[in-house]
């Protein structure tokens, strides 16, 4: 049997909003009933809150709620209505594994750094929180109730020198080394000089790779088209059929956004 880490369902998409809308619908359904999760531990929902970041027309909307996404109809309908034209969207439906079940730990997290850039981060998996807090030179007793993802975001806020790809690879690989199960992450960056970009990682431990139930649950899917680039948790494919590709383990995507267009670079993490 697989391990019983809870994990989450995630979606990152950029491009034409009308093509992203069915992916959002699939995430809502995935959070309500996830057969991959049910196969692992008998639980089928991702009900510990949800949140999203929507980038549209140069502005950012950041929303978090402790309500399950499949019960937050008004917020979901509002978001669906915004999915027209060119947008970038990141959505996270939480099934808590570390940290309190509270609004404080609902993702995506938002941070602004002293180096002139801001970022919004979400993560699916389990990290060694203690080791990351040590890397960030933070007191673990003061952060006992925060999630491992919050610790990771704090590390980036303190240690990441820039949004340049070389710096991203150095610091994400550092955190990757403290993966307990999965290191599936999405980060949207805004640099006051360089504009918006995103960085996506897909990584699972050897134990997850070798166990079919864990692998099916943890794998990420990528969907690429002329007007769409999307990375999503595996369950979305059960609710919205499309030409997905399974993202190979230890893959990263760097996405640059520029006034209604995007460019994607794929690399080894």
Image (spheres, grey):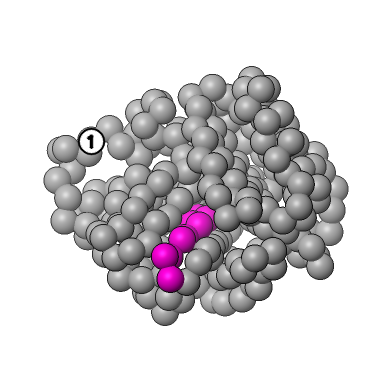
Q: Main secondary structure of the magenta part?
A: strand
Position of 263 with respect to 64 (left or right) is right
- Who is closer to the viewer here, 249 or 8? 8
* Residue at image location 63% in from the left, 51% down from the top: 56
Q: Is residue 190 magenta?
A: yes
176 shown above or below 211: below
Q: Residue at x 37, y 62 (%)?
A: 117
* Residue shown at 69% from the left, 64% from the top: 260
How many numbered circles does the render carry?
Answer: 1
Q: Is residue 99 left or right of residue 97?
A: left
The relative height of residue 71 versus residue 121 in the rendered view (above or below) is above
Look at the image and say whether residue 223 sits in the magenta stretch.
no
Residue under circle 1?
Answer: 144
User: Residue lying furthest bottom in this view?
Assistant: 166
* Magenta part of the chain: 185-193
Asked if 169 appears above or below 152 in the picture, the reply is below
Helix, strand or loop at disc 1?
Answer: loop
Would you call the spot at circle 1 few (<14 residues within 10 Å), some (14-19), or many (20 or more)?
A: few
Tell which of 25 and 97 is nearer to you: 25
Q: Position of residue 249 (x, y in %)?
A: 58, 66
On the question of residue 45 being in view, the answer is no
* In the image, residue 120 above or below residue 76: below
Q: Nearer the viewer, residue 80 or 253?
A: 80
Residue 50 coordinates in the image, percent (x, y): 54, 33
Q: Where is residue 95 in the image (x, y as percent from the top left)?
A: 51, 33
Task: Tell me: 135 left or right of 13.
Answer: left
């Amino acid at each position: 049997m697989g391990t019983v880490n809870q994990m989450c369902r995630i979606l990152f998409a950029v491009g034409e909003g009308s093509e992203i809308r069915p992916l959002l619908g699939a995430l809502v359904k995935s959070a309500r009933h996830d057969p991959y999760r049910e196969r692992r531990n008998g639980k089928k929902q991702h009900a510990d809150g949800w949140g999203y970041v929507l980038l549209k027309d140069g502005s950012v909307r950041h929303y978090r709620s402790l309500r399950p996404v499949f019960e937050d109809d008004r917020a979901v309908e509002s978001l669906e209505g915004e999915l027209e034209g060119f947008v970038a969207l990141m959505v996270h439906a939480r099934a808590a594994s570390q940290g309190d079940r509270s609004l404080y730990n609902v993702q995506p997290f938002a941070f602004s750094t002293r180096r002139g850039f801001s970022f919004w981060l979400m993560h699916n998996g389990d990290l060694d929180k203690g080791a990351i807090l040590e890397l960030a030179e933070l007191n673990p007793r003061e952060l006992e109730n925060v999630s491992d993802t919050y610790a990771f975001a704090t590390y980036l806020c303190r240690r990441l020198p820039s949004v340049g790809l070389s710096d991203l690879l150095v610091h994400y690989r550092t955190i990757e080394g403290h993966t307990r199960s999965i290191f599936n992450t999405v980060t949207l960056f805004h640099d006051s000089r360089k504009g918006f970009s995103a960085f996506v990682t897909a990584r699972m431990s050897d134990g997850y790779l070798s166990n079919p139930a864990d692998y099916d649950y943890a794998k990420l899917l990528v969907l690429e088209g002329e007007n769409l680039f999307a990375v999503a948790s595996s369950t979305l494919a059960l609710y919205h059929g499309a030409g997905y590709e399974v993202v190979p383990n230890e893959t990263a995507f760097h996405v640059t956004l520029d006034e209604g267009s995007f460019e994607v670079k794929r690399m080894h993490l």
